[in-house]
Amino acid sequence: MEKEIRVKQALNNNVVIAKGPLLEEVVLIGKGIGFNRKKGDTISVSEAEKTFVLTDKIEIEQYQTLIKHQDPALIEFLNDIIFYIEAQMDRPLNEHIHIALTDHLSFAIKRADSKIQFSNPFLFEIKSLYPKEYKVAQNIVKQIKEELGVEFPEGETGFIALHIHSAITDRKIRDLNRHHELIALMVELIEENLNITINKDDVNYNRLLQHLHRAIDRVNQDNLLGKEEYLKNVLKTTYPICYNLAWKLVKVMQKQLNKPISESEVLYLTIHLRRLTNKI
């Protein structure tokens, strides 16, 4: 990156958009970096605590609008939150988190102040599937309470964890939500077909969630498992109810993901379903 570039716009005292001859527009973040800066001023990249590039013009406009309509002190605090996430996860974050999480948290704070609460239907699954992200999100919720005096409901912790996972995997929030909706649908089918109410504290339920999560990832990555003919014959004969239900679940996955699924996924699902209940 060029060492010196020119200010295009100071969004507030701590955020500047700049551009160099060889660069796309780059966002510079740092305490006081935008103070008294005017368009055309030369600025050193080394002055910034964090730099990131938004190449999409729509995203640039979204970020500019977001910053302009928020208290600069809040934006500074939320930038610190994003630095904290990057340090805790110890890996680069997708730069879109500067828009997505800042936008989400600013509205979440307003909702909390107005006593408006949103339920999170995937809270348990998020806790189970993304434990590290959830722990970091819990610490962020504590920081928000200490710094701003705002107390979030537990569901909000799950939403923050989802944004963190999105940023470290480069997966969009809407795709993650579709993923969780599919898992929720399959869990509902399991309860209906086996006539059980699943105990979410059961370790076998946690294992089932992990398996469904990995199975969906394998399908999305076109990573098909090899055939297991012997295991297939044993499971089909020994646990026919679980085996048939596993096939039903795989067909649901195929329809939702619109991709072929390895027959071996049926076998591993059968094993997880057998562990889940002693009624069969």
Image (cartoon, rainbow, N blue to C red):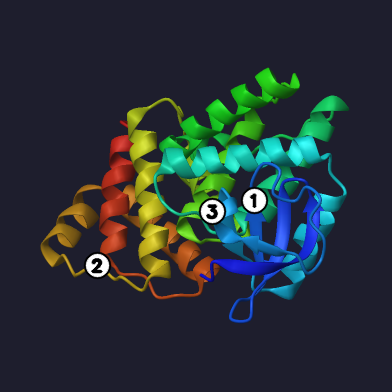
Q: Residues within 10 Å of mark 1 (few under 14, many from 20)?
A: many
Amino acid beneath label 1:
Ile
Q: Which residue occupies the foreground of this view, 213 or 200?
A: 213
Amino acid beneath label 3:
Ser
Decide which of tag 3 and tag 1 comes sooner along the chain: 1
- Give residue 72's quadrant in the image: top right
Tag count in the figure? Answer: 3
| Residue 274 seen in the figure | yes
Disc 1 target residue: 29
What residue sits 62% from the left and 27% below the top?
141
Percent across and percent down for residue 29 are 64, 51
Q: Is residue 60 above or below residue 210?
A: below
Amino acid beneath label 2:
Leu
User: What kind of element bears circle 3?
Assistant: helix
Find the residue positioned furthest to the left: 230
Find the residue positioned furthest to the front: 42
Query: For this view, does 168 lie left or right of residue 147?
Result: left
Q: Please tell me whether mark 3 or mark 1 is closer to you in this view.
A: 1
| Residue 197 seen in the figure | no
The span from disc 1 to disc 2 (Cα, nearest Å) is: 46 Å
| Residue 166: assigned label | 3
User: What kind of element bears circle 2?
Assistant: loop
What residue sits 39% from the left and 35% below the top?
205
Query: For this view, does 5 lie left or right of residue 188?
Result: right
Q: Please tell me whether mark 1 or mark 2 is closer to you in this view.
A: 1
The span from disc 3 to disc 1 (Cα, nearest Å) is: 22 Å
Disc 2 target residue: 225
